[in-house]
Image (cartoon, grey):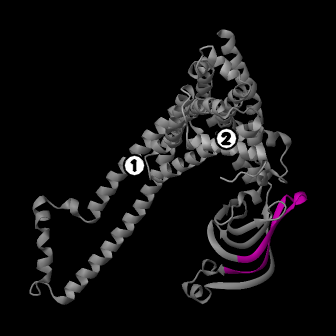
């Protein structure tokens, strides 16, 4: 029996290891292309690019392991079924359940390793990766500017909005709006149809060249007398070309290894996340109490005793009595009341917005905490899905195995993203969002394992497998 179990595990590892290597490099290349615009043509040395890729490796590894186990299970057991080895082993009285149990130690070790990796290497990799990206953006102005939002570009003292970046190095700009600052205060508004970043390495300057635009300049701060400020409030000028010189001597001295971001939710381990969640919940509770007291104070309710409060239901009746309050005074009372109510409404809306942002932040930390425990569970789930699926498919090799692997993994990814977005927005409790993909795929894994072990019928799954097999064999495009 030991020889059979050893053969099963060896056969699985022969499929798992190559799958992991291939998937790892595919994911790394995909991530590299995702951030290609931030790296290409920016003068970065090979070592910096290597560190950039190395810091994203923990995330890649944690996603590659479950998919590799899934593909390894499908290919190894599919190959054994195709060669009738699986039938021969079952004829010896060894069930699929026993075969899976013989591999349980390996799977448990991989699951435990995934959790340790997610709790140690992943936070450290995210920590170094985020800081490296931030430092590269500080060093490279074109990278630091995001489309569609205002970007505070401190070296030039400007706040810049760009509709679109294009060109070989994304150094060409379309529809530029700039708030230029003087002594830290926005003083000049510049609007241009297009722009260009051009570097001058000899003078350590970067020129921001703007084309076909105009600018408004506030002159009131330049006038000492109030009368002069009224005479010369602002000036408007047009230009065909306008150049802003940016001194990059300080940018060229940016230490790419410097770390200053350290408290984001994706950079913390389980213990740190737990502490941060408790801190955020305490702050939220304190905020609610302070908000309640402030509302009472602004309405002066906190100054009233219970007898005064109980008599407030008669106030409107008193105001309606013209012998007590004249219509002129009543109009003023209503106006002041409406003004005060509107002020309270705006105050409450500001606080509600702040509270909503704080709640989203708390949800992100809670989701990140529970997500740490989903990595080992996904290893087990992919094992429960892959092994019986391979026995059902009865086909080895990368062809059909990759098709089913992609279907299942994409399903897992979509469910994870849906759960994450719903958790962060508060549509569902944050912990449910983290466990959403697990809750859907775990029953599928248990069902497949039970049915395959008992040679049961699968209905829709059998029909799907037959359909995919037929299309793969015909070499046609598969349309689901």
User: Where is residue 73 drawn, in percent x and y?
Assistant: 67, 29
Instruction: Looking at the picture, tell me which residue is in the foreground, 406 or 165.
Output: 406
Instruction: Looking at the picture, tell me which residue is in the foreground, 469 or 402.
Output: 469
- Taking the spot 58% from the left edge, 25% from the top edge, the residue there is 112
User: Where is residue 35 drawn, in percent x and y?
Assistant: 75, 50
Q: Give the residue pinned by disc 2.
A: 404
Can residue 261 be seen here? The reply is no
User: Where is residue 262 drawn, in percent x and y?
Assistant: 60, 41
Magenta stretch holds residue 201: yes
- Residue 268: quarter of image: top right
- Taking the spot 79% from the left edge, 47% from the top edge, the residue there is 475
Residue at disc 2, secondary structure = helix
Q: Which mark is residue 284?
A: 1
Magenta stretch holds residue 153: no
Query: Is residue 149 positioned above or below 464 on the image?
Result: below
In the image, taking residue 167 as reference, residue 322 lies left or right, namely: left
Instruction: Tell which residue pokes out farthest to the top in this image.
Output: 2
Instruction: Looking at the picture, tell me which residue is in the foreground, 478 or 308.
Output: 478
Name the N-terminal-most of marks 1 and 2.
Answer: 1
Residue at disc 1, secondary structure = helix
In the image, taking residue 324 as reference, residue 227 lies left or right, namely: right
The magenta segment is: 191-216
Q: Kindly report which numbered mark, 1 or 2, lies closer to the viewer in this rendering.
A: 2
User: Where is residue 91 drawn, in percent x and y?
Assistant: 63, 16
Instruction: Tell which residue pokes out farthest to the right in this image.
Output: 202
Image quadrant holding the N terminus, namely: top right
- Mark 1 closeness class: few <14, some 14–19, many ≥20 residues within 10 Å: some
- Taking the spot 66% from the left edge, 69% from the top edge, the residue there is 182
């Amino acid at each position: 029996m030991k020889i059979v179990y050893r053969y099963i595990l060896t056969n699985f590892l022969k499929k798992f290891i190559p799958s992991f290597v291939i998937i790892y490099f595919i994911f790394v290349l995909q991530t590299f292309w995702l951030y290609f615009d931030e790296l290409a043509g920016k003068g970065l040395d090979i070592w910096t690019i290597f560190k950039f890729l190395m810091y994203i490796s923990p995330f890649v590894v944690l996603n590659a392991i479950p998919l590799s186990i899934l593909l390894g299970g499908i290919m190894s057991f599919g190959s054994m079924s195709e060669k009738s080895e699986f039938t021969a082993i079952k004829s010896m009285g060894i069930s699929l359940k026993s075969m899976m149990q013989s591999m349980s130690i390996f799977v448990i070790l991989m699951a435990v390793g995934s959790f340790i990796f997610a709790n140690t290497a992943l936070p450290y990799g995210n920590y170094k990766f985020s800081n490296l990206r931030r430092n590269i953006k500080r060093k490279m102005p074109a990278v630091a500017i995001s489309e569609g939002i205002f970007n505070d570009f401190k070296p030039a003292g400007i706040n810049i909005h760009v509709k679109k970046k294009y060109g070989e190095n994304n150094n060409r700009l379309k529809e530029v709006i700039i708030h230029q600052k003087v002594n830290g205060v926005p003083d000049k508004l510049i609007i241009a149809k297009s722009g260009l970043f051009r570097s001058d390495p000899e003078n350590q300057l970067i020129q921001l060249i703007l084309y076909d635009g105009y600018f408004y300049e506030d002159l009131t701060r330049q006038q000492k007398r109030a009368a002069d400020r009224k005479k010369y409030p602002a000036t408007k000028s047009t230009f065909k070309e306008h150049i802003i010189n940016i001194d990059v001597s300080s940018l060229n001295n940016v230490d790419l290894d410097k770390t200053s971001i350290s408290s984001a939710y994706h950079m913390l381990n389980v213990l740190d996340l737990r502490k941060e969640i408790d801190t955020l919940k305490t702050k939220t509770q304190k905020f609610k109490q302070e908000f309640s007291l402030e509302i009472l104070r602004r309405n002066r309710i906190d100054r009233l005793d219970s007898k005064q409060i109980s008599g407030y239901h008669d106030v409107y009746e008193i105001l309606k009595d013209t012998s007590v309050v004249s219509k002129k005074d009543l109009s003023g009372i209503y106006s002041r009341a409406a003004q005060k109510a509107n002020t309270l409404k705006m105050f409450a809306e500001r606080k509600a917005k702040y509270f909503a942002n704080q709640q989203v932040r708390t949800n992100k930390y809670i989701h990140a905490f529970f997500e740490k425990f989903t990595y080992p569970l996904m290893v087990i789930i992919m094992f429960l899905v892959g092994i019986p699926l391979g026995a059902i498919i009865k086909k080895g090799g990368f062809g059909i195995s990759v098709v089913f692997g992609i279907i299942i993994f994409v399903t897992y990814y979509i469910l994870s993203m849906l759960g994450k977005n719903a958790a962060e927005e508060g549509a569902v409790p944050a912990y449910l969002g983290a466990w959403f993909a697990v809750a859907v795929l775990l029953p599928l894994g248990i069902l497949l394992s039970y049915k395959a072990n008992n040679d049961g019928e699968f209905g829709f799954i059998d029909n799907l497998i037959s359909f995919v097999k037929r299309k793969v064999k015909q070499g046609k495009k598969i349309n689901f």
